[in-house]
C-alpha cells in the first residue's frame, strides 16, 4: 500500500471512527436524558399518590367533623377532596399506563376508595336525616375504619413499588451518565490518536516518495543497461509515433535512422524492409509497432526481411502497446530478432518432414496395394471354401477344406492386424457408438471358441456380475476384437484346465459405466522378467513361443492400443507354470430407450426379398465375379455384371436397378468415379454398397462421404453382405423414400437439438424451418463463390455454413465443409473443392428429405 493510499485510508478511518463515536455519544446522552425523564416521571407518580392518601385522610376528617358537630361547613372540604382524588387518580393512571402490575393495584385502590366514599355518603345522609346518635352508631361499626386501613395499605404498597422502579431508574441514569462521560473522553483520545497516526503516515509517505524517486532513477539506469545487453533489438515509439528509445542491437539491425527524429511514415525506407520473398516494401501500416500504436496487442510476424550488405536477413518481430492508468496508449514497443539460423533450420525440417511424409505415403501405398492384392484372392479362397463346406464331402475332404479355411482366416487375421497397426499410427482409428449387449457378445464368443476348447479338452466359462447393465453403448466390433485376441491367446497357451472370462460393473460415472473384463487361464504363464514387454509389437514371452504356438506378436499390442484409445486400461498378472490373468477396463455410454430398441431389431435378413430385386454387380476380377454368382445362386438371386464403371454407367442408364454392389479398383472408370457420376450427373439415389479389398485407414469414411450407402471389405462375409443388402432394400421398399441411409447412420441427427430445447416441439419446428431456408442460401452462395474461384468467399461461406449444419447434427456435411475451408487456407486445388462441393450437394439433398420427415413428427 503506498503512502498516499495509507493517508487516505487513515483519514477515512478517522472520519468513520469519529462518526461512530459521535453517534454512540449522541445515543448515550440521549439514553441519559431519557433515564432522567423517567426518574422525574416516577417521582411525580409517588408524589401524586401520596397526595391521594392525604386527600383521603382529609375527607375522613371532614366526615367526622360533620358527624360530631352537624356543621355543614365541614362538607366543603369533603366535596373538594373528592374532586381532587378523582383528578389525581386519572393523572396517576395515565402516568403508569406502561406498568401493568401498578395499573392493577391502582384499580384495586379505586374499588376500595369507592366503597369508602359510599360509606362516608351513608354516614353523612344518616346524620342529616336521623341525627348524631344514629350516625355515630354507623361510624362505630368500624366499617369505615377498616376501609381506611385497606386504602392506606394499598396506597403504601403502590408507593413502595414505585420506589423500587425509582431506584432502578436512578441506577440506569447513573450508568448512562458514566457511559456518556467515558464516551466523550474516549472520543477526544481517539481524535488525538488519529491525528497523530495520520501525521505519522504522512511523514512515512513523504520519506518513501523521496526514496522511490531515487529508486526510479536507479532502475531506469539499470533497465537501460539490461536493454543494451539484450541480444535482440528493442524499439519504442511514443503515443505520437515519434521514436522514443532504441537499444544498440536495434540500431545495429535496423540502422541509425530509427533513432529519435525519424517518423513512422518512412520506416520501410529507413531500414529497407521488404515483404519476405518479394521486392515489395513492407507497408508502414502493416509494421507491428505501428499496429500496436493503433491499439492492437501481442503482435508477432516473421514475414519481413531487411536489406543488409549484399543480401537480406529475415526478422521475427513482436510488438505490443503500453497504456496508462486511464487505458490510453502511451508507448508502443517492438522486439526485433535476426532469425536467419531459425529459417535455415526450418527449411531443413521441412525437407526432413517431406521425406518422412513421402516415406509414410510409400508405406501407406504399399500396405494398401498389399492388402488389396492379398484380399482379392483371399475373397475367392474363403468364399469358395464356405461354398464347398455346404456340400456333401467325404470326411477327409471336409478336413482338407477346413484346413484351407482356417489357414486363410489366419492369414486374413494377420493382414487385419497389420492394417490396424497402420490405422493407429496414422491416427485414423475410429470407434463407433452402438448398443452392446455384453451377454450376447459372450454367447457369440462362447460359440466361436467352444470347439477349439473341446479339441484341447479345456473348460471355457463366460460369466458376469448381476449388476452388469443390460445394454451399454460403445464399439461392439472393437470389443469383440479385444476379447478374441485375449481368449484366443488363453486357449492357445493352455494345455490343461481352462479359461474363465468374467465381466462386472466396476463403477458408475456421469453418463458412463466403467466395466471390467477378466480373462484368466491355467496355461504356461509368463515369467516376471518378461511381463513388461508382452504388449510390445512382434514381441512374445519366449523366442520359441512363435515357433511352438504360432502368431505374429501383434495381438496383445493391438488389444492394448484399442483399449487405451477408448479411454480404458489393461493390466496383466501371471505366474510361470500357473497361469495368466488379463484385466482391462473400458468406459461405456449408458444406453437409452432408442439404443435398446435398435439392439432389439431383427439383425437377420430374408434372401427371398433380395431375390425379387434387380441387382448390378460392378467387379472386374473374374474369380470374385464367379464367387458372387455362386453365392447368389444358392438363393436364386439374379444379377447383372459390369466389368468396370464405364460399362456400369451404360447398363444403369438402360435399366432401373434396385441396388448396386461396387468394386473400387477397376480399369476404364474406378468405383469412386462411377459413384460420383451416378449421384451427381445422373442424380440417382440408388443404394450402393462398396465392395472392396481396400481396408486402409479412412477408406470406409471416404466411400460413405462420396455417396455410397454401406461398406463391405473383402474377403466378403456372406452374412454381412446379405444383411446390408436386405437393410438397404427394405428401407427403400417399406419407407418409399429416397433417403440415402448408411450403415453408420443418417445424414442428420437431431438428438442434440432436441435435447438442447428440451423437446419443445414449437422451437424444434422453428429451428428446422430456419435450417431449410438457410442451407439452400448457403449452398447456393458457396456454389457461386466456387464458380468465381473466390477463395476468401469460399472460406467465409464454408465457415458460416458449418454452424448451419451443426444445428441438425450433419456430421458428414460438417466434415466436408471443414475440408473445403482447409483447402482455402493455402488456395488449394479448386478442382478438389469442386469435388468436395459435389459430395456436399448430394448430402444436402438427403438432409432436406430426412429433415422434412423429422419435421412432420413435430408439426
Image: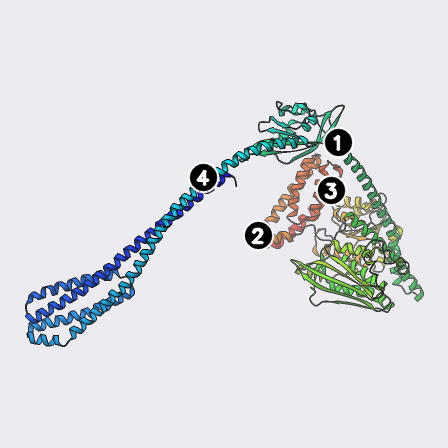
Q: Earlier in the sequence, mark 3 or mark 2?
A: 2
Which comes before the other along the chain, label 1 or label 3?
1
Callout 4 environment at 10 Å: few (<14), some (14 to 19), or many (20+)? some
Q: Quadrant of residue 143?
A: bottom left
Q: Please state which of residues 640 and 834 is positioned toward the viewer in this rendering.
A: 834
Task: Residue under label 4, please give it.
Answer: 199
Q: Nearer the viewer, residue 605 or 427?
A: 427
Q: Is residue 658 left or right of residue 774?
A: right
Q: Secondary structure at mark 3?
A: helix
Select label 4 or label 3 by which is in front: 4
Q: Which residue is mark 3?
A: 836
Tell me the mark number nearer the camera, choosing from 2 and 4.
4
Q: Earlier in the sequence, mark 1 or mark 4?
A: 4
Q: Report x, y in % for residue 725.
A: 78, 56
Cα–Cα gap, marks 2 and 1: 62 Å
**Residue 601 seen:** no
Q: Give the percent coordinates (x, y) of residue 33.
A: 30, 53
Q: Which residue does the numbered mark 2 point to in the structure image?
A: 762
Amino acid at each position: 500500500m503506498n503512502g498516499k493510499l495509507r493517508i487516505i485510508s487513515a483519514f477515512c478511518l478517522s472520519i468513520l471512527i469519529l462518526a461512530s463515536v459521535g453517534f454512540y455519544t449522541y445515543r448515550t446522552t440521549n439514553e441519559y436524558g431519557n433515564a432522567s425523564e423517567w426518574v422525574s416521571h416516577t417521582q411525580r407518580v409517588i408524589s401524586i399518590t401520596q397526595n391521594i392518601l392525604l386527600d383521603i385522610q382529609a375527607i375522613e376528617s371532614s366526615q367526622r367533623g360533620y358527624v360530631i358537630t352537624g356543621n355543614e361547613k365541614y362538607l366543603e372540604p369533603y366535596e373538594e377532596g373528592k374532586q381532587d382524588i378523582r383528578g389525581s387518580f386519572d393523572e396517576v393512571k395515565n402516568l403508569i399506563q406502561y406498568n401493568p402490575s401498578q395499573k392493577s393495584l391502582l384499580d384495586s385502590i379505586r374499588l376500595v376508595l369507592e366503597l369508602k366514599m359510599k360509606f362516608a355518603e351513608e354516614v353523612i345522609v344518616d346524620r342529616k336525616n336521623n341525627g348524631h346518635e344514629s350516625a355515630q352508631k354507623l361510624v362505630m361499626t368500624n366499617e369505615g375504619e377498616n376501609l381506611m386501613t385497606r386504602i392506606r395499605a394499598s396506597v403504601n404498597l403502590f408507593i413502595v413499588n414505585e420506589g423500587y422502579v425509582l431506584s432502578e431508574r436512578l441506577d440506569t441514569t447513573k450508568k448512562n451518565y458514566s457511559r456518556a462521560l467515558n464516551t466523550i473522553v474516549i472520543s477526544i483520545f481517539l481524535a488525538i490518536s488519529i491525528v497523530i497516526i495520520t501525521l505519522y503516515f504522512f511523514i512515512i509517505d513523504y520519506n518513501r516518495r523521496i526514496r522511490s524517486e531515487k529508486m526510479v532513477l536507479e532502475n531506469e539506469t539499470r533497465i537501460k543497461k539490461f536493454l543494451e545487453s539484450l541480444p535482440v533489438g528493442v524499439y519504442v515509439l511514443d503515443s505520437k509515433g515519434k521514436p522514443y528509445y532504441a537499444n544498440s542491437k536495434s540500431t545495429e539491425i535496423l540502422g541509425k535512422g530509427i533513432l529519435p527524429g525519424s517518423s513512422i511514415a518512412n520506416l520501410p525506407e529507413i531500414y529497407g524492409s521488404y515483404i519476405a520473398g518479394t521486392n515489395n516494401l513492407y507497408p508502414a501500416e502493416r509494421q507491428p509497432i505501428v499496429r500496436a500504436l493503433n491499439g492492437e496487442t501481442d503482435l508477432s510476424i516473421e514475414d519481413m526481411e531487411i536489406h543488409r550488405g549484399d543480401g537480406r536477413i529475415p526478422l521475427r518481430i513482436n510488438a505490443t502497446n503500453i497504456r496508462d492508468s486511464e487505458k490510453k496508449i502511451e508507448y508502443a514497443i517492438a522486439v526485433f530478432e535476426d532469425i536467419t539460423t531459425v529459417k535455415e533450420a526450418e527449411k531443413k525440417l521441412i525437407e526432413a518432414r517431406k521425406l518422412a511424409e513421402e516415406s509414410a505415403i510409400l508405406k501407406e501405398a504399399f500396405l494398401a496395394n498389399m492388402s488389396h492384392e492379398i484380399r482379392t484372392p483371399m475373397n475367392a479362397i474363403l468364399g469358395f471354401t464356405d461354398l464347398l463346406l455346404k456340400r456333401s464331402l467325404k470326411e477327409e475332404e471336409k478336413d482338407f477344406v477346413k484346413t484351407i479355411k482356417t489357414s486363410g482366416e489366419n492369414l486374413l487375421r494377420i493382414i487385419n492386424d497389420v492394417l490396424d497397426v497402420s490405422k493407429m499410427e496414422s491416427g485414423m482409428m475410429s470407434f463407433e457408438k452402438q448398443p452392446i449387449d455384453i451377454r450376447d457378445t459372450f454367447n457369440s464368443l462362447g460359440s466361436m471358441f467352444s470347439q477349439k476348447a473341446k479339441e484341447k479338452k479345456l473348460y471355457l466359462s463366460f460369466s458376469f456380475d448381476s449388476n452388469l447393465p443390460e445394454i451399454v453403448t460403445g464399439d461392439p466390433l472393437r470389443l469383440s476384437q479385444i476379447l478374441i485376441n485375449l481368449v484366443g491367446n488363453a486357449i492357445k497357451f493352455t494345455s490343461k484346465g481352462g479359461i474363465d472370462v468374467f465381466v462386472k460393473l466396476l463403477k458408475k460415472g456421469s453418463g458412463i459405466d466403467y466395466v471390467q473384463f477378466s480373462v484368466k487361464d491355467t496355461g504356461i504363464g509368463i515369467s516376471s522378467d518378461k511381463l513388461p514387454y508382452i504388449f510390445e509389437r512382434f514381441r512374445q514371452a519366449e523366442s520359441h513361443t512363435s515357433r511352438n504356438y504360432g502368431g505374429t506378436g501383434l495381438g496383445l499390442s493391438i488389444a492394448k492400443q484399442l483399449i487405451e484409445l477408448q479411454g480404458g486400461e489393461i493390466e496383466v498378472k501371471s505366474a510361470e507354470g500357473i497361469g495368466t490373468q488379463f484385466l482391462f477396463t473400458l468406459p461405456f455410454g449408458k444406453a437409452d430407450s432408442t439404443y435398446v430398441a435398435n439392439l432389439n431389431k431383427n439383425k437377420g435378413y430374408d434372401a427371398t426379398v433380395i431375390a425379387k430385386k434387380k441387382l448390378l454387380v460392378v467387379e472386374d476380377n473374374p474369380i470374385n465375379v464367379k464367387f458372387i454368382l455362386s453365392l447368389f445362386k444358392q438363393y436364386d438371386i439374379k444379377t447383372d455384371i459390369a466389368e468396370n464403371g464405364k460399362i456400369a454407367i451404360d447398363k444403369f442408364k438402360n435399366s432401373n436397378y434396385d441396388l448396386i454392389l461396387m468394386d473400387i479398383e477397376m480399369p476404364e472408370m474406378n468405383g469412386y468415379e462411377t459413384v460420383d457420376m451416378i449421384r451427381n450427373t445422373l442424380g440417382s439415389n440408388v443404394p450402393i454398397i462398396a465392395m472392396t479389398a481396400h481396408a486402409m485407414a479412412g477408406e470406409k469414411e471416404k466411400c460413405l462421404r462420396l455417396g455410397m450407402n454401406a461398406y463391405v471389405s473383402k474377403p466378403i462375409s456372406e452374412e454381412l453382405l446379405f444383411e446390408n443388402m436386405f437393410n438397404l432394400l427394405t428401407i427403400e421398399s417399406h419407407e418409399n423414400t429416397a433417403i440415402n441411409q448408411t450403415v453408420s447412420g443418417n445424414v442428420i441427427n437431431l438428438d442434440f437439438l432436441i435435447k438442447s430445447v428440451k423437446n419443445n416441439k414449437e422451437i424444434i419446428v422453428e429451428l428446422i424451418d430456419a435450417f431449410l431456408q438457410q442451407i439452400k442460401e448457403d449452398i447456393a452462395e458457396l456454389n457461386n463463390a466456387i464458380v468465381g474461384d473466390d477463395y476468401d468467399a469460399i472460406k467465409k461461406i464454408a465457415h458460416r455454413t458449418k454452424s448451419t449444419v451443426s444445428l441438425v447434427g450433419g456430421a458428414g456435411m460438417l466434415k466436408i465443409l471443414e475440408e473445403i475451408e482447409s483447402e482455402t487456407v493455402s488456395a488449394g486445388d479448386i478442382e478438389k473443392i469442386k469435388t468436395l462441393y459435389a459430395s456436399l450437394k448430394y448430402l444436402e439433398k438427403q438432409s432436406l428429405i430426412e429433415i422434412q420427415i423429422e419435421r412432420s413428427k413435430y408439426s
